[in-house]
Image (cartoon, helix red, strand yellow):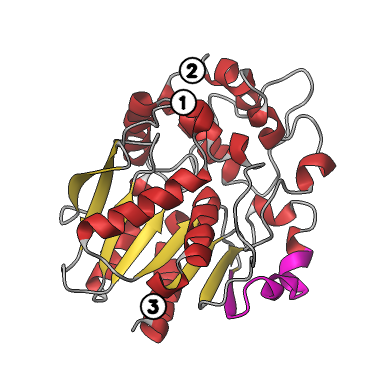
Amino acid sequence: MDQIVHKFVEVNGVKLHLAEIGSQSSPVVVFLHGFPEIWYSWRHQMVAVANAGYRAIAPDCRGYGLSDPPPDTEKFGFSDLVDDLLAILDSLGIDKISIIAKDAGTRPANLFTLRYPTRVTGVISLGIPHTPFGPPEFLKELPEGFYINRWRESGRAEADFGRFDAKTVVRNIYILFSRTEIPIADESQEIMDIVGPSTPLPPWFTEEDLSVYGALYEKSGFLNPLKVPYRSMDEEYDITDPVIKNPMLLIVGEKDYFFKFPGVEGFVKSGMVKHFATNLEIEYVPEGSHFVQEQFPDKTNQLIIAFLHKHSS
C-alpha cells in the first residue's frame, strides 16, 4: 500500500485522481470501481498485479473520491466515464490496457471495449455479466422497496442518507451489499433503516478501511454517485454491435446478492451470456460476496493474474 502513488490528471474539463503502482514500462491494467467504492477498493489487487509485472492504475471516477465532480450532474452519464478513460490513457501516452471492473464500473469498461476494441487486451468483470444495454428488466420485477428503485427516485436517497454522516452511510451499504439477500425495504422504512446501528462490519472490512471510504465520501457527497450508476440506467449509446469479442473473464461470488436478481443466474449458467461475450471465461468463488475482491483477495488475485498472463501481449 505504501508503494501506491497518487497523481491528478486534467481531462475533459475535470481534474481526476489516479492511484498507481508498478513500472512505467510494464503492461497497464486499469481498475474501474463501482458504488459505494473508490480507488481504494482495489488496494489488494493493485499491489498483486504490480508484483506480477504490471502497471496498475485505479482512477476515482468523476464525482467520486478525490476527483472533481462533473460540471452538471443532470447531464452526467456513463459515457462521460468512457470519455474520461480514453483521455486518461491518451494523456499518459498509454496505447493498450487490460481492464478490471466491478459492479457499476463494468458498464464503462464494456462500452470502452466496444468503442475501442484494439486498445483492450482483455476485460475482467467482477460479479456483473455483459448484457445488452438499457434499463434492466429486474427493475420492474422487484418491488418498490428494492434499493435500486428507491435510489433512482429523485430526492429519496438524499433524504435517507442525509440523516447520517457519510461514514455511516458507507458502513450500512457495505453491510447490506455483503449479505446474500437482495436489499429490499418495507413500505414503512428507508434503505438505511434495514441495518441496525449495532450490526458489525463484515470481518474482512476494518474500521480503518471504513474511515478511508467515509472521508472520501464526506468530500464527494452522494449526489453524483447516485446519478451514475442508478439514475443513468436508461442512457442510450451509439453501439451497433453489442457483442464483445475481446477476451473476458467473469468472476462470480456465489453468495453475491446480485446473482439472485431475476434472470441473472439463468443468463450466466445457461450460456446465454456468451452470446454477448464470445470469448468469455467464467470462474466461481463459492463463498464470495458482492465484494469478492476485498473478501477473498488472494483467490481473486490468483484468477486475475492467471488471466492477465494468458492474454497479455
Comparing marks 1 and 3, which lies closer to the viewer?
3
- Residues rendered magenta in the picture: 266-284
Q: Considering the numbered disc 3 on the image, is that residue within a helix, a strand or a loop?
A: helix
Label 1 and label 2: CA atoms lie apart by 6 Å
Task: Indicate whether residue 271 is drawn in magenta.
Answer: yes
Q: Which residue is mark 1?
A: 168
Q: Quadrant of the C terminus?
A: bottom left
Relative horizontal placement of residue 269, taking residue 254 as reference (left or right)? right
Q: Foreground: 253 or 266?
A: 266
Residue drawn at the location 54% of the way across and 24% of the way down: 197
Pinpoint residue 270: horizontal percent, then vertical percent: 78, 74
Residue drawn at the location 48% of the way across and 39% of the way down: 36
Q: Considering the numbered disc 1 on the image, is that residue within a helix, a strand or a loop?
A: helix
Seen in the picture, residue 168 relative to 99 is either above or below; the reply is above
Q: Which residue is mark 2?
A: 164
Q: Looking at numbered disc 1 in the image, what kind of residue is underneath it?
A: Thr
